[in-house]
Every structure is written in C-alpha cells, then in structure tokens.
Amino acid sequence: MVYLVLDGPDGGGKSTQATRLSVFLRERGHVVQHLREPGSTPVGEALRRLLLARDTGELLPLTEVLLFSAARAELVARVVAPALQRGEVVVAERGYVSTLAYQCLGHQHGVDFDWVLDVTRRAHGACLPDAVYVLDVDVATGQRRRRARTDDRFEARDAAFHERVRAAYRAVAQRDPAVELVDASQDVETVQRDLQRRALRWLP
C-alpha cells in the first residue's frame, strides 16, 4: 500500500520515531512492517554487522555502496514488495538517501551521484519509497543524544564528516521530490505528530 522511510543524520531519532509511527498506524487498523536498513533479512543483518562494526575498519565508499545496495535489494525483493502487494504499510529506518548522503555527497572521496542513483534503481526496481522523511538535526544535538550508547563505525567519525552528511541530506532533499525535511530538534512528541500528519496523507 504505502512505503515510508525515516532517514537522516545520526541522533535524529529514527528508531524511536519509526517505532511510534508504526504503533500509531497499527492502532488505525493498518498492517505495518517496521523494517531497518541494512537489515530485516538474514543477508541484511549479516551485512549490517559487517558495515557497522568498528573493528571492520575503513572501507572504500564504493565498497560500502555495493554492500548497502546488496542488503537493500534483498530487503525490497523479499520483504517490502510482497508487503505492499498484500496492502500493508512499510515503515523503514533508513534507505537509499542514506547512501547518497554518506557514501556520495557527504564523503570527501564520494562515489559518483548518478552512478549511485543507477545502482539504487536496480536495487529497488519499481518499488521505490512513496516518501522519505529526513529527520534533520544539527551535529551537536545528534552527538548529545547518542551519549548513552556506543557509537558504531559511522557514528564514531569526526564532526566534520557529520556536518558534510547533514549538508548532503539537505542537498538530496532539494533534488528528490520524494524527500521531505522534518525538524527533529524538537521534542519527541512534536516530531511524532508531524510525522503522523505527513503519513496520513498517503493513507485512507
């Protein structure tokens, strides 16, 4: 039925907001698949552990694009597309916009934007998200919110990298009509109400 993605810089509250949005939509009578990228398939979870583990070390941006895209192709083909065909709602944490932000525009030696778009189209086929909500938050706020947990391989990178990533998300939002910026610096309930309002545009 509807494929919604919550994306954005680290510390924006994607997991919290996706969980709450999924509960809200279920309470309205919808069957909801709450997924995460990479992950939510056996291959995706294995690649997630590899990509996020700090002991993996540095990878080429191209390598990261290919691994994220492989996980995405499995998720779309095996979980997302069948769910949509059954008339369900998909709420996913992260998606292709993360790849454009982290491995393309936000990286000092990023992969070519148009090439990544081509790989993305091949991974998704005709099953692209209806809307991508980028939970936009400044780097300092994102870091403060993450203090209670151990940073993964991407979160542990320096502030300059995260500033580039945030700017990259904003740039993608200007290029892609499916991408909407959401002010995630507000309190959890305010952000959730905003997301609920946006999601309901797509639902009966």
Image (cartoon, rainbow, N blue to C red):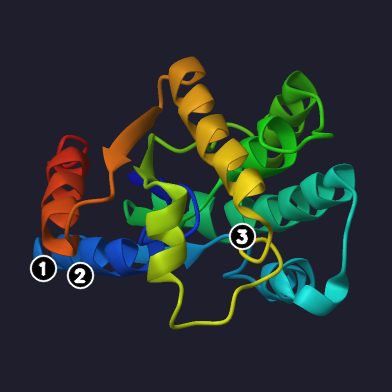
- The kind of residue on which mark 2 rests is Val
- Label 2 SS: helix
- Residue on which the image places disc 1: 27
Label 3: few (<14), some or many (≥20) within 10 Å? Answer: few
Query: Which SS class for mark 3?
Result: helix
Left or right: 78 as drawn, with respect to 84: right
Mark 2 crowd level (few <14, some 14–19, many ≥20, 10 Å Cα): some
* Residue lying at 37% horizontally and 43% vertically, measured from the top left: 136
Q: In this view, does 148 lie above or below 153?
A: below
Against 192, residue 65 (above or below) is above
Alpha carbon separation for disc pair 2 and 1: 6 Å
Give yes or no for contact between labels 2 and 1 (Cβ–Cβ under 8 Å): yes
113 or 184, which lies in front? 184
**Residue 202: x %, y % from top left:** 22, 37
Q: How many C-alpha atoms fall within 10 Å of the one at disc 1: few (<14), some, or many (≥20)? A: few
* Residue indicated by mark 2: 23
The residue drawn where x is 75% and y is 30% is 116
Disc with the residue nearer the chain's start (3 vs 2): 2
- Give the residue type at disc 1: Glu
Vertical position of residue 2 compared to residue 92: above or below: above
Q: Which residue sits at x=61%, y=58%?
A: 75
- Residue located beneath label 3 in the image: 78
Task: Identify the amino acid type marked 3.
Answer: Arg
Q: Residue at x 50, y 16 (%)?
A: 175
76 displayed left or right of 181: right
For numbered disc 1, what is the local secondary structure? helix
User: Residue 115: percent from the left, percent from the top?
Assistant: 80, 24
Relative to 38, say whether 164 is above or below. above
